[in-house]
Image: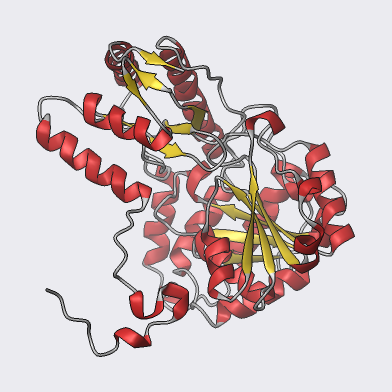
Amino acid sequence: MSVDPWFQSLFAERIGGANYGKSDAIYKFEKIKRAKRQALAEHPERKLLDFGIGENDDMADESVRASLKAEADKVENRGYADNGIQNYKDAAAEFMKRQFGVTLDPVTEICHCIGSKPAYAMLPACFINPGDVTLMTVPGYPVAGTWTKYLGGDVHRLPLLKENGFFPDLAGIPADVKKRAKLLVINYPNSPTGAVATKDFYKRVIDFARTNEIVVVQDAAHICLSYQGEPLSFLQIDGAKDVGVEVHSMSKGFNMIGWRLGFVAGHPKIVQAYADVKDNSDSGQFMAIQHAAAAALRNPAIPVAVKAKYERRLKKLVTALKAVGFQCEVPGGTYFLYTSSPKAAGDRKFANAEEASQYLIHEQSVCCVPWDDAGSFLRFSVTYIAKDEAEEDALMAETMNRLKGMKLTF
C-alpha cells in the first residue's frame, strides 16, 4: 500500500489538489501505447503497422543540419537568446512575405517560441482571468484550454462537425459565453480533421472577433502541408492582424519536429504581451538552432519537398482504405487522414471509435488514433517509417490485406 507524502495536500487544485496522482483514468494515447506493447508481445511475428504517430519521420534537411553544426561552434551563440535573435525574426518575416504576401515588422510583430506548444500555454496567461472563457475547437490540441483552466478560466468547446465542413459554429455560441470570452483558438489546416480554411471563413472569424471583442489565436502548424491550392495564412485577410496572432511551427513543414522552434506573429501589442510572459518563463531557444531555422525558412524547396512526400502517401492510404470499405478522401491539409470509424467487424460491434481502434491494434496490429469528440472518427497518420516508395507500397498492400479480412462495416 502506498503512503501519501507529507506534501500531498499541498498540490494545487488546478492539477487535482490532494487527489493528485490518484486517478486511475488512462489518457487515450497511453491506452494506445499499452495496446501496442501488448500486440507486439503477443504477436512478435506480426509487424506493427503504426499510423498513430504524429511526427515527421525524416530528419531536417542536410543544409539545415550543416548550418546547426557551424553555428554551434561559434562562441557568440553560447548564451541566452531571451526573446529571440534578429536573424530568425527577419527570416520569419521574409517567409511570411514570400509565401503569403504578408508584411510584418520583424522587430515588433514577430517573436520566437520554443516550439508552438509553449506559446499556447503562454498566450492565455496574457488574457485570461478567473471566470474568463477561451473558445476551443474540438477535436484539437488542448494546451490553450488546459492553461485557461489552470488560470481559473473556463473552456467552451466548439465541435468540428463533418456536416459543417469541420468549421466551428460561431453563430451558435450562447450570448453569456460570448460576453465572457476573451480568446478564440482555431487551427487550419486543421489537426486532426485535415480541413483547410477559406477566405470567407477567416472573414467571418474576424467579424466575430471584432463584434465580440475576442482575440484570435490561429494555429498554423500544418500550413505548409496544404493540398488544395496555395497555403492560406490568417494574416493574409484584411483585418486579421487587428484581432489576433498566428502561431507558426518549424516542425511539420520543415522536418524539424524535435528542434522546438516556432514563432508568434500578428498584432504588435499581443506579440509584446506574449514576449513579456515568455521572458518570465524561459530564456529562449539555443541561438544555433534559431540560425539553422532561419536558413530553413529561406529555402523554399524544403517545405515543397515535405508537402509532396506526405501528399503522395495520403493518396496511397486513401486508396488502401477505400479498398476495405472506408469512405475517405485526401484531406485539404496536414499529414493526417480523419475518417469515420467502422461500426463493426464481422459480429463484433463498436460503441465508439476508441473500441474500434483498440480492436484494430489487438486483432491485426494496425495502430491509429480514435476521436470521439464530434462523432466517431479514426485518425491515420502517414508519418510511418518507410525508406522509399517501394516500402510505402508494400506497407499499403499489407494494410489492405489485414483490414480486408476483418469484414469491417460502416
The one nearer the camera, 245 or 201, is 201
Is residue 222 placed above or below 14 in the rendered structure? above
Task: State how many labels appear.
Answer: 0
- Name which quarter of the figure residue 112 lies in: bottom right
Asked if 238 appears above or below 311 in the picture, the reply is below
Q: Is residue 51 visible?
A: no
Give coordinates of residue 276: x percent, y percent: 63, 80
The residue under the point 68% across, 29% down is 163
As drawn, which residue projects farthest toward the bottom?
6
| Residue appearing at x 59%, y 33% in the figure | 333
Residue 76: x %, y % from top left? 46, 76
Q: Nearer the viewer, residue 181 or 17?
A: 17
Q: Quadrant of residue 350?
A: top left
Q: Residue at x 51, y 55 (%)?
A: 293
Above or below for 93 versus 107: above
What colouring style does the render use? secondary structure
209 relative position to 281: left or right: right
Where on the picture, by quarter, is residue 368?
top left
Where 324 sits versus 131, above or below? above
Q: Where residue 405 appears, x then y in whole percent?
A: 28, 11
Question: In which quadrant will I find the N terminus?
Answer: bottom left
Q: Nearer the viewer, residue 295 or 228?
A: 228
Q: Is residue 239 left or right of residue 166?
A: right
* Residue 312 visible, this orientation: yes
Residue 249 horizontal/vertical position (percent): 55, 52
